[in-house]
């Protein structure tokens, strides 16, 4: 009898895991919360508005088309879209609870799925550090600008700035211009020396990173062609406006990302798109009991195996290495989850080393530096959901000498809103120095991976683990 | 202002989708099949549709279903992430004001 493999997330990592597992002879179920495949990287137009020229908006689109056709055609692969995994149970075999149907609708079809092996490939969302005005409409995460341009052909503004840290800012600027927006500038917090140290150390190794090198070179060429200024050591330190963004304040930063006084200048804009890196979507692996490392990614061995038997992880939940890393990790995870032989993986193991190298360079060059706190004001909202300002958070932490994240959250309500601290969790930890009591007490731990309606919960013969409901 | 790339000017020229109509707080908005509800609103230049407890406007922020800023009541169901929900012809969307709960009480009166 063949092995059954359940793959959660149909981005680059999950798609390649599903195909590799089927190639190794497994029966595969691939599911994703979205209604299309491709994850964040290959987010694309819905079938009603498809385009034969869509490849122009993407890198590696032919590869995506091959993967998509394969998972649709292969009888050994069952694809479930609009399938939101909302809980993981570990009594006995690891079982995932799924609701299938339109996002957040009542009465979606409940499923409980288990398999011989599970591959988590839930990816990451971008992280935006707070700054005054980041809660004004017209401020978007850079990922939102990207997702809306690729997935809906929406330009989030006519005059935009893109800011934050990391190579991701470049494709975002490109997508915005392709959608007709004027991009006034891309502001990268890392200073030139810092960025160069990360990227130029041992340049021969970058050659091994198949897609990323040429892709980045392509964006830089694009920048020069379109004459979008790309400034290193600069940031949007404030967004201003009456009820929506009308101006962005840009300042030079020192090597620690603290704004250099006197360098502020104001530009009129209607969109500010900001991302300072990525946060892995860890709630499912953590609920399954998978150990995470000191850098807060799922720990995996050479076979992409987590600390829980039969549970694998691939893609951005194991480290931010971009699409090449996600693809190769997915292949290794899928192949091994299906019981495939390790000797078939030699080339992929080599590719993964090159991809790991890219991940280290991104972190070295663009990792968050502590000086950014200097752009906060007492009334800057840190937790968007509960509207907790920085001053109150800082004073509460100081007054109570809080060392438990949980009690700090209960006192201030920071991180207790409907997003379950996805937006502010790590920032709150960083700003207050409040230590999680244990790995299971970090902001990454969420008993429910998605809000679920009381009516649906009552209808499911299961023990709710507590957590916030939407009604 | 947010806007939809005009089809004729779009280098990738997506297929012409058939139109749909939704209502937002009773007013009719035209959209296209395949758009998310947030997409319909943004295509009309609307970047805010929710009001927070403190009375501040919010709209889409993360665009991929993780921040919950863009939630609205859709066909009577509250807290639907509009960036994740495809619009369907006839959808009745009501914007949410967190300063007043659904039963009309002020936030301080809530249990
Ligand atoms: C908005 C956004 C846009 C991006 N665009 C680019 C880009 O243009 N270029 C670039 O180089 N990098 C981009 N990135 C970085 C990108 O994350 C990686 O390059 C790549 O997509 C990672 O692949 P992955 O397979 O690990 O995860 P993802 O592509 O993120 O795929 C994860 C999938 O898991 C699904 N999922 C998560 N949780 C659940 C659940 N509970 N139940 C069911 N399904 C679930 C998600 O719906 C998603 O489809 C983007 C990131 C974001 C957040």
Image (cartoon, rainbow, N blue to C red):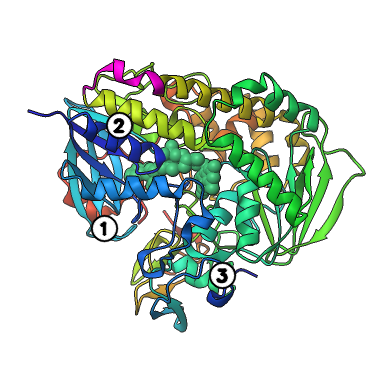
Residue A217 location in percent, x, y?
Answer: 66, 40
Principal secondary structure, stretch drawn in magenta: helix
Identify the residue at the far right of this view: A262
Q: Magenta includes A342?
A: yes
**Label annotation for residue B10:** 3
Q: Magenta includes A52?
A: no
Chain assignment, label 2: A
Residue span colored magenta = A339-347
Chain assignment, label 1: A
**Label annotation for residue A101:** 1
Q: Badge 2 is on which residue?
A: A119
The residue under the point 33% across, 17% down is A307
Which type of secondary structure does the marked residue at label 1 adopt? loop
Residue A38 location in percent, x, y?
Answer: 39, 48
Quote the CA–CA distance across marks 2 and 3: 38 Å
Q: Quadrant of ligand 1?
A: top left
Residue B64 location in percent, x, y?
Answer: 47, 52
In the image, which is nearer the foreground, mark 1 or mark 2? 2
In the image, which is nearer the foreground, mark 3 or mark 1? 3
Q: Is residue A228 above or below residue B19?
A: above
Camera-nearest residue between A156 and A151: A151
A305 left or right, relative to A168: left
Q: Is residue A54 visible?
A: yes
The residue under the point 39% across, 47% down is A64
Identify the residue at the far left of this view: A1
Q: Determine whether label 1 and label 2 are within 8 Å by CB.
A: no
Callouts 3 and 1 on one subunit: no
């Amino acid at each position: 009898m063949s092995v059954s493999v359940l793959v959660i997330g149909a981005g680059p990592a999950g798609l390649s895991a599903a195909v590799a597992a089927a190639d190794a002879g497994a029966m595969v179920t691939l599911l994703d919360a979205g209604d299309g495949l491709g994850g964040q990287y290959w987010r694309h137009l819905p079938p009603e508005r498809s385009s034969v020229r869509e490849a122009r908006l993407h890198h590696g689109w032919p590869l995506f088309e091959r993967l998509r056709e394969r998972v649709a055609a292969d009888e050994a692969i069952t694809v479930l879209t609009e399938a939101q995994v909302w809980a993981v149970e570990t009594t006995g075999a690891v079982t995932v609870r799924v609701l299938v149907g339109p996002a957040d609708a009542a009465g979606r079809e409940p499923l409980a799925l288990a398999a011989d092996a599970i591959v988590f490939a839930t990816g990451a969302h971008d992280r935006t550090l707070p700054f005054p005005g980041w809660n004004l409409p017209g401020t978007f995460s850079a990922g939102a600008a990207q997702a809306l341009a690729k997935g809906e052909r929406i330009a989030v503004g006519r005059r935009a700035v893109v800011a934050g840290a990391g190579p991701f800012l470049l494709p975002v600027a490109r997508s915005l211009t392709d959608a007709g927006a004027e991009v006034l500038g891309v502001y990268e917090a890392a200073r030139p020396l810092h960025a160069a140290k990360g990227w130029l150390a041992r340049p021969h190794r970058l050659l091994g990173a198949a897609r990323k090198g040429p892709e980045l070179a392509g964006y830089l060429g694009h920048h020069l062609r379109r004459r979008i200024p790309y400034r290193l050591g600069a940031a949007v330190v404030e967004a201003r406006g009456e009820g929506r963004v009308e101006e962005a304040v840009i300042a030079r930063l020192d090597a620690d990302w603290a704004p250099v006084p006197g360098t502020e200048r104001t530009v009129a804009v209607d969109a500010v798109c900001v991302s300072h890196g990525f946060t892995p979507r860890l709630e499912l692996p953590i609920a399954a009991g998978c150990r995470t490392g000191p850098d807060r990614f799922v720990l995996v061995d050479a076979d992409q195996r987590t600390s829980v038997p039969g549970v694998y992880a691939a893609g951005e939940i194991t480290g931010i290495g971009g699409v090449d890393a996600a693809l190769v990790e997915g292949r290794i995870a899928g192949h091994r989850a299906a019981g495939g032989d390790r000797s078939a993986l030699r080339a992929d193991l080599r590719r993964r080393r090159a991809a790991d190298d890219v991940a280290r360079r991104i972190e070295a060059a663009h990792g968050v530096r502590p000086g950014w706190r200097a752009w906060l004001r007492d009334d800057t909202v840190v937790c968007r959901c509960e509207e907790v300002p920085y001053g109150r958070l800082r004073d509460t932490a100081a007054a109570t000498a809080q060392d438990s994240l949980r009690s700090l959250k209960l006192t201030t309500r920071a991180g207790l809103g409907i997003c379950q601290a996805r937006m502010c969790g790590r920032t709150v930890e960083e700003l207050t120095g409040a230590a999680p009591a244990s790995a299971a007490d970090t902001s990454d731990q969420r008993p429910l991976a998605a809000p679920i309606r009381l009516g649906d919960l009552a209808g499911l013969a299961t023990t709710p683990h507590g957590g916030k409901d939407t009604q | 202002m947010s806007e939809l790339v005009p089809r004729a000017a779009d280098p990738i020229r997506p297929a012409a989708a058939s139109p749909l109509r939704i209502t937002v707080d009773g007013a009719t908005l035209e959209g296209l099949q395949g758009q998310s509800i947030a997409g319909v609103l943004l295509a009309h230049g609307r970047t805010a549709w929710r009001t927070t407890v403190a009375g501040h406007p919010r709209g889409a922020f993360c665009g991929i279903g993780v921040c919950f800023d863009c939630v609205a009541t859709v066909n009577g169901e509250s807290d639907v992430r509009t960036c994740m929900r495809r619009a369907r012809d006839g959808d009745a969307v009501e914007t949410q004001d967190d300063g007043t709960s659904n039963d009309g009480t002020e936030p301080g009166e809530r249990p």
